[in-house]
Amino acid sequence: MVARFYCDDLSAATVRLEGKEARHLLVSLRARRGHTVELFDGAGGLARGIVAATSKRSCTIELGERLTAPPCPSVALDVAVAPPKGTRQSWLVHKATELGVRRLTALRTRRGSVPADSVTERWQRIALEASKQCGRLWLPEIDAAGLADFLALGTDALLLLLDPSGRPLGRCLEGVQKHVVLLVGPEGGFDAEEQRTATAAGAIPVAVAPHILRIETAVLAGLAQMQGFLGWGTSDGSV
């Protein structure tokens, strides 16, 4: 299997890898001139290349064949979630990336115990590593926002509010064609005012299990159910 690396621009005939990507190639894989690699740009681009030159901290790749990538899935699945504590965040981001989340927003909520604005850089690193491991070509968007600000942006998406007392999630997906957003609150859930704000914006309370789930479990259960119902859009696994 050809190792895959990230490069945000594949338009030139040669590209230069530095930092963590170069260290992985040069130190972990001990690549030398002539070594074949694959590069993806996180926006659906994929190319095969050959290591042309190396130094202690960088390497030059000559790009060759541009590989045909599958289209972006027809239905965008976004999750806005209050970050859980500790290593549970890593698990959430990694598995959500594997399950094809398009956008992952860290929500600021009244009951949230983790500052949402402090996690975005780490989440981006985790999403990149998860994308490389699972073969995904489209990097998820990562950002942070307060619940009210997030809802005030307005969207034509189907808004779903995770609530153990809500209707089964699958019953709300009939006829969905383009965009779904799942809102997941902190431990203890959204408070009453936040719930009113969400429902006033059109969010439908839904449940993914008959009992209370931890934050990261709820996110993954929701994504898995949506992908199962929607059939992964146009994806062949490289979402």
Image (cartoon, rainbow, N blue to C red):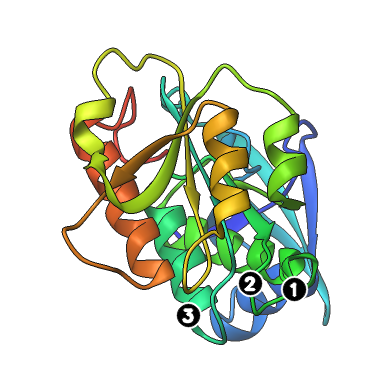
Q: Classify residue 92 as left or right of residue 10.
A: left
The image quadrant that residue 225 belongs to is top left
Q: Secondary structure at mark 3?
A: helix
Task: Classify 120 as above or below 222.
Answer: below
Q: Classify residue 202 as left or right of residue 120.
A: left
Which amino acid, by three-letter code, is at mark 3? Arg
- Of 179 and 171, nearer the camera is 171
Q: Which residue is mark 3?
A: 88
Which amino acid, by three-letter code, is at mark 1? Pro
**Distance between mark 2 and mark 3 Cα atoms:** 14 Å
Q: Which residue is mark 1?
A: 115
The image quadrant that residue 228 belongs to is top left
Q: Residue at x 57, y 16 (%)?
A: 156
Q: Classify residue 167 as left or right of residue 141.
A: left
- Of the image marks 2 and 3, the number of the one nearer the N terminus: 3
Asked whether the residues under the numbered discs 2 and 1 touch, taking CB atoms below 8 Å apart as contact, a structural biologist would say yes
Task: Classify 74 as above or below 209.
Answer: above
Q: Residues within 10 Å of mark 3 (few under 14, many from 20)?
A: some
Q: Secondary structure at mark 1?
A: loop
Residue 112: mark in rendering: 2
- Of 234 and 61, nearer the camera is 234
Q: Residues within 10 Å of mark 1 (few under 14, many from 20)?
A: some
Which amino acid, by three-letter code, is at mark 2? Gly
Residue 190, percent from left and from top:
54, 59
Q: Residue at x 63, y 22 (%)?
A: 155
Residue 6 visible in the displayed image: yes
- Of 100 and 36, nearer the camera is 100
Residue 25, percent from left and from top:
62, 72
Which residue ends up furthest to the left in the rendered image?
210
Residue 29, percent from left and from top:
54, 79
